[in-house]
Image (spheres, rainbow, N blue to C red):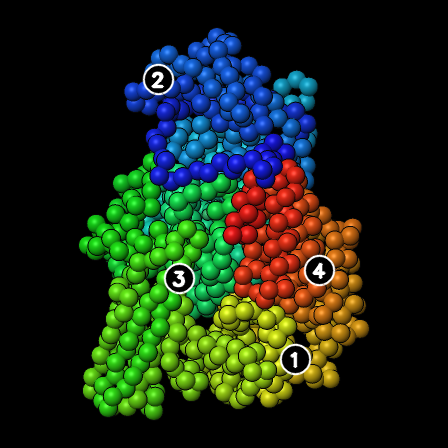
Amino acid sequence: MADAQTATQAPNVTRREDYNEPDWRVPEIALDLDLDPAATRVRTTLWVERGGVHDRPLRLDGDGLTALSVKVDGAETMDWHMDGPNLVVPLSGSAHTIETEVEIAPERNTQLQGLYASSGMLCTQCEAEGFRRITFFPDRPDVLSRYKVKLTADKTRFPVLLANGDPIAQGELDGGKHWAEWHDPFLKPSYLFALVAGDLVANRGTFTTMSGREVQLGIWVRAPDLAKTDHALHALKLSMAWDEKVYGREYDLDVFNIVAVDDFNFGAMENKGLNVFNSRYILADPDTATDYDYDAIAAVVAHEYFHNWSGNRVTCRDWFQLSLKEGFTVFRDQSFSADQGSAAVKRIEDVRGLRASQFPEDAGPLAHPVRPDEYIEISNFYTATIYNKGAEVIRMMATILGPEKFRAATDLYFDRFDGTAATCEDFVQCMEQAGGVDLTQFRRWYSQAGTPRVSATLAQEGGRARLSLRQLVPPTPGQPVKEPMVLPLKLKLFGGFTGRPMCDEQLILLKEDAQELLFENLSETPVLSINRGFSAPIVVETNRTAKDLAFLSAHDDDPFARYEAMQQLMLDTLVTSVTNGGTDHAAVIEAVRNTLTDSALDRAFVAEAVLLPSDSFIGDQMAVVEPEAIFRAREALRADLGKALEAEWRAAYEGSLANRFEYSPSAKGARRLKTVSLGYIAASGAADADQLAFDQFSLADNMTDRQGGLTTLVNGASPLREEALEAFYQRYQGNGLVLDKWFQAQALSTREDTAEMVERLVAHRDFTLSNPNRARSLIGAFSVNQRAFHDVSGRGYRFVADQLIALDKLNPQTAAKLIPPLGRWKRFDEARAAKMRAELERIVATPGLSKDMFEQASKSLD
Ligand code: 0A1
Ligand code: ZN
């Protein structure tokens, strides 16, 4: 691979404080690509202008490119040289035209960055630094250009030719070729460039914007997939309308195209007017996609669409500002999804996700601030911290400002920075100005890593209560000492006897290390509800008893706080049980019974509330993670809940049997509760549980129910297990996205022999490391299966390291993303930690390791 390097080479660190404005601007670029999978010719014309007064040459980034010719102002020149992978051209004047020509081989591009081939089509991925793999260019987000693109290709193999902007002209050529020209009138950085060539069909639609312009929409896929694109098209129209209504943002081109590709390193990409998607975030029908998939498709379609303003019209000055576009856009897509169904359930899901991925990141060797200070490989910084913690930071500012001022602040931001490359600081200044607030101390959310911990102690003295709050921000790599943060905490007191609220909800800003609040004239013992709605992305420890938590889980009027109380009760019980080798489950059983039988509650909410915290989240609460003990404690609680509430689970199951598939919030809630109940019925050890799961699996008219039946069986030992796995495989052979579910279900199995099974599945004829979704469905899923991955023998570690070393040779970006589970060694006992470290050391010592993997693995050893 071109960017492979050995671990012995000093890694090149890029620092935020080293930022300088570009030496040369490129207001215009014309690209002429003669597309061919084996040999694509790229002819590029750049109109360059000297930025400021300096005598530095023009430096164009390249990655694996050889210049076949260089012209300055129309004349071929030899006055250029290579500096490593980059092209350097000395220039005398203040403005010139530069023409370069290179040849690239998309079919050999297994990294899936730059121009590559996927299932017979050609497509691009340029964020963050892929454009330099296509042509020489100052490949940094603060160089904004107007693009003209001409594509030429064989007409039979590539009948459809797409690029950014609007289609301008097209024509036929001799020899079976044709061409198309696209112009994008908007200034954009190179990472937003895209092209697609392939044999594709479109699901077309139109959207009339708020100023009355008609936009042509197209979702492009291969012909057999056309029937699976209605949901994505619908989600796109909803997103366009939502952004007009909620943020006043209108779409700006005459066409908006989305293309689905099978091989893609991330979820999707917001290229101007031509979004490219991992096909898993486009294709859906009831037979192949779960409710989770449907929701994720709508969320990702919205996310990429929203980037048209938060990312494209206003882009990032440098990659340290990545959260400027990503945190804000995740916040926008979360708000959009909340508006489509139950906002409470959406918030619960988002917090669950944050705790599953961002909290561990913030507590481990790869912790970094929302605005990092340095990186070796920027691809490693597309993290839960940049995206999800970044979204929480925006959410906190929205909470502090309130909806009207927040909207005024985003209007100001879009207005002021339209057509430019901005910084996180620019965004915060808009919040301050339009919000009339001082966010000086709040800015620490951008600079300090680590999840703040708050202890909240409520003490009653007669008719008064004193709430003592303390905050602590833990040390993280490179940041041993932290300053206190601004923590917006929503809180409320409830009467422990009457259940009545004792005050209105208050928003307090905890800014000091310690702060106290007094509540007077209390007529009964208060129970504290705090961090309601998860108003701050922190860990809260309280002195609430099991009785208080059970009470809140039944009476709190904030659904998130209700869920949270139940989770805390479950966690406290499980942690005690792990530590003591068993405990009383009565309080959890009663709390679950109350929620499960409360007919006033939305079923989607009930399903979330009665789910036990995951093995890993239980582990996160402990000083030393004990995978087997956690697994046993959790299974014991599941079994007790199953047995004690068997009648209630069965009633919930029966009550959730719908006759026909429908994608609506209430039908989704019913399906969710149905499978959660099935899991508890199976945990109870009921004699008919396997048959019930098998019937659900075989009679289902939708993938959600089918997958629910399958995963229940996959965790068990019934002969129906094999039968279901085989039937599922046969039914979906040839459908890659569904086979991913088949691999994943087995990798996530709670059975004792999972490691062995996963090792065997690597040899399965449908397994391949070259497709990122497939690699993640088996290797990625297995490494988050706490019990199986952390098998005391160390075989799980060895297996994952072997796979990642192999994957790195094909696709460094995807391999490096799978390092973090191995990097969590400090959280485990010495024997496991030593084995995990040994695998990381083996990875770092691998000859030819990519810098992506080098950065992740070597930092994980510290
Ligand atoms: N900007 C995209 C994420 C993305 C990042 C890098 C990629 O390739 C290396 C691809 C996509 C988003 O936020 O959706
Ligand atoms: Zn994004």
Ligand 1 within 8 Å of disc 1? The answer is no
Indicate which disc residue 474 carries: 3
Indicate the position of residue 166 as horizontal and vertical percent values: 46, 32
Are the residues at dot 4 and dot 2 in contact (C-beta closer than 8 Å)? no
Label 1 neighbourhood size at 10 Å, few (<14), some (14-19), many (20+)? Answer: many
Name which residue lies at 36% across and 62% down. Answer: 473
Name which residue lies at 67% across and 65% down. Answer: 791
Q: Which residue is mark 1?
A: 683
Instruction: Between label 1 and label 2, give the one nearer the viewer.
Output: 2
Q: Between marks 4 and 3, how big is the CA–CA gap?
A: 32 Å
Ligand 1 within 8 Å of disc 4? The answer is no
Are the residues at dot 1 and dot 2 in contact (C-beta closer than 8 Å)? no
Residue type at mark 4? Arg
**Residue 156 falls in image quadrant:** top right
Q: Between marks 1 and 2, how big is the CA–CA gap?
A: 73 Å
Residue type at mark 2? Asp
Q: Circle 1 sits in a helix, a strand or a loop, which is it?
A: helix
Q: Is residue 264 visible?
A: no
Q: Which residue is mark 4?
A: 795
Q: Circle 4 sits in a helix, a strand or a loop, which is it?
A: helix
Residue type at mark 1? Ala
Q: Which residue is mark 2?
A: 55
**Residue 291 falls in image quadrant:** bottom right
- In the picture, the quarter occupied by the N terminus is top right
Name which residue lies at 30% across and 53% down. Answer: 443
Name which residue lies at 26% across and 65% down. Answer: 512
Indicate the position of residue 85 as horizontal and vertical percent values: 54, 26
Label 4 neighbourhood size at 10 Å, few (<14), some (14-19), many (20+)? Answer: some
Which numbered disc flags the more N-terminal residue, 4 or 2? 2
Ligand 1 within 8 Å of disc 2? The answer is no
